[in-house]
């Protein structure tokens, strides 16, 4: 988790806008492979795996997870939260992610 403080000692956490600190802690604890890059999510396991090796095994890893470019989509916070939960679940259960772990 990327934590910084500003000149007023207000703690800033790099996290998706639709999540509060409790959600950041929950998803970070439940999915040790998730990391934050600004407001986006990425997968530590997939990022640290040789993509060429995955392709040779017939497994395709989503570039958005490798490039820390996963964000919640939707026109309100509830939809964005649901979208991120769905993306995390789908990625966690994907063949590529399982192979990388």
Image (cartoon, rainbow, N blue to C red):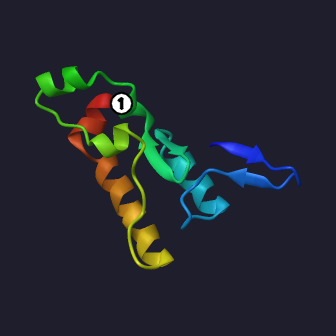
- Helix, strand or loop at label 1? It is loop
Look at 18% across and 36% down and name the residue there: 60
**Residue 23, position as x, y percentages in the image:** 58, 61
**Residue 50, position as x, y percentages in the image:** 29, 21
Compared to 29, does 98 lie above or below? above
Residue sitting at the far front: 7
**Residue 75, position as x, y percentages in the image:** 41, 78
Residue sitting at the far right: 8
Residue 87 is drawn in which quadrant?
bottom left
Compared to 76, does 11 lie above or below? above
**Quarter holding the C terminus?**
top left
Asked whether, in this view, residue 13 is left or right of residue 70, the answer is right
**Residue 52, position as x, y percentages in the image:** 20, 22
| Closer to us: 90 or 15 | 15
Look at 70% across and 44% down and name the residue there: 3
Compared to 1, does 9 lie above or below? below
Residue 16 is drawn in which quadrant?
bottom right
Asked whether, in this view, residue 35 is left or right of residue 99, the answer is right
Query: Label 1 belongs to which residue?
Result: 101
Q: Give the number of marks.
A: 1
Q: Residues within 10 Å of mark 1 (few under 14, many from 20)?
A: few
Look at 48% across and 51% down and name the residue there: 40
Look at 54% across and 67% down and name the residue there: 18
**Quarter holding the N terminus?**
top right
Asked whether, in this view, residue 93 is left or right of residue 85, the answer is left
Compared to 62, does 86 lie above or below? below
């Amino acid at each position: 988790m990327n934590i910084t403080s500003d000149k007023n000692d207000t703690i800033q956490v790099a996290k998706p806008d639709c999540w509060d600190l409790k959600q950041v802690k929950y998803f970070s604890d439940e999915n040790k492979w998730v990391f934050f890059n600004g407001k986006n999510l990425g997968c530590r396991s997939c990022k640290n795996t040789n993509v060429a090796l995955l392709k040779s095994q017939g497994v395709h890893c989503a570039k958005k997870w490798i490039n820390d470019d996963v964000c919640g989509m939707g026109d309100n916070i509830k939809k964005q939260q649901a979208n991120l939960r769905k993306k995390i679940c789908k990625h966690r259960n994907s063949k590529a992610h399982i192979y990388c772990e």
